[in-house]
C-alpha cells in the first residue's frame, strides 16, 4: 500500500464526530486506509479507546484496512497514573475480537523492533522480552514489567477470522 497523500484533520477522538470530520475533509471510507495510532491510545479512557478501535475495525467491512498502533500493558500505565489510562495486556487478542485479522505483535527489543538502539543485554526491554508476558513483576528485582507493544493488524471485506 502506498500513500498518495497525507491530510491532517483537527478532531477530538473523545467526541463522536471525529469520523465525520474526516469525511468532511474528503476522507473516503471506501478506499484502502492505513491508520497510525502511535502514542495515542493510552492517553484515552478505556471506553474512548475502545470506540476508536471499533470504529476503525468497522472499516474492515468496507475496504482493506491496516492499523499500526502501540499499546501499554497495565504495569506501564503506573509510570504516570494521571496521564495513562487505556491499556491492554493482550492486544493481540483484543484486536481480533473487534474484527481485525492478521495481527502481528512485537515488543521493543524484538528482532523486528530494536531500531538499532538496544545492544546492551542489561537493557530493560531486553530483560523483559525474555520473560513470559503473563509475568507482571520481574523475578530478579521485583520491579513492574512495564511493556510497550507495537501492533500491526489488518482486515478486509473478504477476511476470515480464525
Image (tube, rainbow, N blue to C red):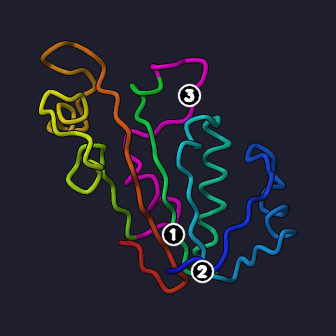
**Neighbours of disc 3 within 10 Å: few (<14), some (14-19), many (20+):** some
**Neighbours of disc 2 within 10 Å: few (<14), some (14-19), many (20+):** some
Which secondary structure lies at badge 1? Answer: strand
Percent position of residue 50, x then y? 61, 48
Rendering quarter of residue 42: top right
Which residue position holds label 3? Answer: 84
Residues shaded magenta:
78-101
Tag of residue 141: none
96 in relation to 77, above or below: below
User: Earlier along the polypeptide chain: callout 2 or callout 3?
Assistant: 2
Which secondary structure lies at badge 3? Answer: loop
Which residue position holds label 1? Answer: 66
Residue at image position (61%, 34%) is: 43
Percent position of residue 47, x then y? 65, 41
Rendering quarter of residue 153: bottom left
In space, the residues marked 2 and 3 are separated at their CA atoms by 31 Å
Amino acid at each position: 500500500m502506498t500513500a498518495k497523500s497525507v491530510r491532517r484533520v483537527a478532531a477530538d477522538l473523545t467526541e463522536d464526530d471525529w469520523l465525520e470530520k474526516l469525511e468532511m475533509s474528503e476522507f473516503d471510507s471506501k478506499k484502502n486506509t492505513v491508520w497510525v495510532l502511535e502514542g495515542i491510545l493510552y492517553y484515552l479512557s478505556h471506553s474512548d479507546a475502545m470506540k476508536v478501535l471499533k470504529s476503525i475495525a468497522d472499516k474492515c467491512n468496507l475496504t482493506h484496512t491496516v492499523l499500526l498502533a502501540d499499546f501499554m500493558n497495565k504495569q506501564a500505565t503506573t509510570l504516570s497514573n494521571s496521564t495513562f489510562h487505556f491499556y491492554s495486556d493482550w492486544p493481540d487478542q483484543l484486536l481480533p475480537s473487534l474484527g481485525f485479522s492478521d495481527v502481528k505483535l512485537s515488543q521493543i527489543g524484538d528482532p523486528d523492533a530494536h531500531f538499532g538502539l538496544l545492544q546492551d543485554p542489561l537493557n530493560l526491554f531486553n530483560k523483559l522480552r525474555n520473560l513470559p508476558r503473563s509475568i507482571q513483576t520481574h523475578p530478579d528485582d521485583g520491579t513492574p514489567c512495564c511493556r510497550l507493544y507495537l501492533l500491526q493488524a489488518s482486515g478486509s471485506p473478504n477476511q476470515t477470522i480464525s
